[in-house]
Amino acid sequence: MTTEEKIFNAARIVFQKKGFAGARMQEIADEAGINKAMLHYCFKTKQLLFEAVFMNAFGQLAPQINAIFNSDETVFDKIRKFAHSYISFVIENPYLPQFIIQEMNNNPEFAMSFLNHENRPNPDLLISQIEKEIIAGIIKPINPKQLLLDIFSLTVFPFAAQIMVKAIIQISDSEFNQLMEERKTSIAEQIINSIKR
Amino acid sequence: MTTEEKIFNAARIVFQKKGFAGARMQEIADEAGINKAMLHYCFKTKQLLFEAVFMNAFGQLAPQINAIFNSDETVFDKIRKFAHSYISFVIENPYLPQFIIQEMNNNPEFAMSFLNHENRPNPDLLISQIEKEIIAGIIKPINPKQLLLDIFSLTVFPFAAQIMVKAIIQISDSEFNQLMEERKTSIAEQIINSIKR
DNA sequence: ATATGGTTTAACCATTTGGTTAACAAAGAT
DNA sequence: ATCTTTGTTAACCAAATGGTTAAACCATAT
């Protein structure tokens, strides 16, 4: 593993746990097991290192989402696939959702800057497909944006609020993961059930 | 308004926007329009000021939730009431959910310390009620914890991820609020529909 | 062997930041 | 009137923090 990779991985761990403002360059250096000066040698500034980590995180999610949203399957199958592949991916990267949401919130201008171009998650095609399937009588007349919100909410929230969720409904890490496994299918069927004619 | 109130309100604004780590005592003082030394005169340390704000935020939500969860209504009515009153409240305090989730994530030990005693949201009673109604044949056999997750997800997530949601599905503040108004009833009916026999 | 280029480090620096202090103002209490 | 307590401020301080530098290290080409 190159030094740059060591730094990047360490930065991901620290940034995802503490956020941009709470992360310390020294802590990242320690985590990577190298001298702090190397951080600046490889990534120039904290901001640039952070952006590398954030872009990477977002860049892992957005294409996956778009691939599903823009495929040529039915809405129902897209919902099934989304729930399944999103939850699978996030079980392996449990800090990602909260990390992305948090930094977007703490720094909206920065977040917006790349949410407006390139590979952002783009639901336009899915929305018009939903409208077509409503007209075709496959789906009940609903607001497509509400449907999108439902899908995102049911899949993402338990991860984004992981710590609170675990504490409130009193479950361990393994019980949590088990619940999430169940959700891969239960969420999709529940949504489909509530919108199919 | 007393100086202490001015500080508290300013602190709430700054902490909710920037988080504990990103907030600056000077910025809170400026927001309150007073000298920085007053912060320490009134609240001693940043940590204590933060705890006052956080406790207050959490203290507004938890009792509301428990009041609904522990009333003597049916599960269906509790779901309706929860969606309605939670969304109503959070529309007025849109930063609250993300704030609480973020700080719990960045500082789990602190969060846990008071999630374990006193007025934490406690779903135990609701869970056993769900189990009873399943046995009584009112509700389909489901995992009560999944049901709780669904309820929280559908109500809380759009607020917690507000900025990202607005950007991805391309809506303005007022469109967002309108969607949330719709959700007060649509969420409850959707959930009930998916679990009733 | 040694000159050359990138890589790594210890020590250092300037600024920011939470927190303190000492003086000052205002308002009751005597 | 003046003493005492409480509220308020400007100036200050020590520690933390992001970032820099100059020297050392090390591989490779000559």
Image (cartoon, coloured by chain):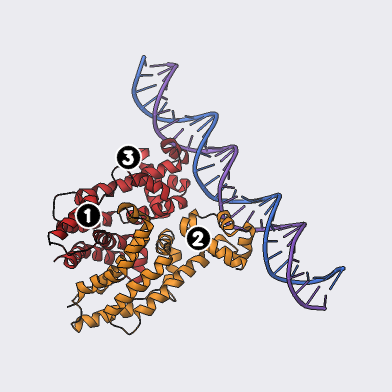
Chain colours: A orange, B red, C blue, D purple
Look at mark 3 in the image and give the residue it sits on. B1
- For this view, does B193 lie left or right of residue A169? left
The residue under the point 62% across, 57% down is A36
Amino acid bearing label 1: Ile
Nearest the eye: A194 or D19: A194
- Identify the subunit bearing mark 1: B
10 Å neighbourhood of mark 3: few (<14), some, or many (≥20)? Answer: few
Per the rendering, the mark at residue A190 is none
10 Å neighbourhood of mark 2: few (<14), some, or many (≥20)? Answer: some
Establish whether labels 3 and 2 are both on one chain.
Answer: no
Residue A94: name its quadrant.
bottom left
Amino acid bearing label 3: Met
Give x and y (percent) for residue B72. 14, 50
Q: CA distance from mark 2 to mark 1?
A: 35 Å
Look at mark 1 in the image and give the residue it sits on. B127
Q: Nearer the viewer, mark 1 or mark 3?
A: 1
The residue under the point 38% across, 44% down is B113
10 Å neighbourhood of mark 1: few (<14), some, or many (≥20)? Answer: some
- Identify the subunit bearing mark 3: B
Residue A77 vertical placement versus B195 (above, below): below
Asked whether the residues under the numbered discs 1 and 3 touch, taking CB atoms below 8 Å apart as contact, a structural biologist would say: no
Q: CA distance from mark 1 to mark 3?
A: 43 Å
Give x and y (percent) for residue A193. 20, 73
Q: Nearer the viewer, mark 2 or mark 1?
A: 1
Q: Is residue B87 visible?
A: yes
Nearest the eye: A6 or A143: A6
Q: Mark 3 or mark 1, which is nearer the start of the sequence?
A: 3
Look at mark 2 in the image and give the residue it sits on. A13
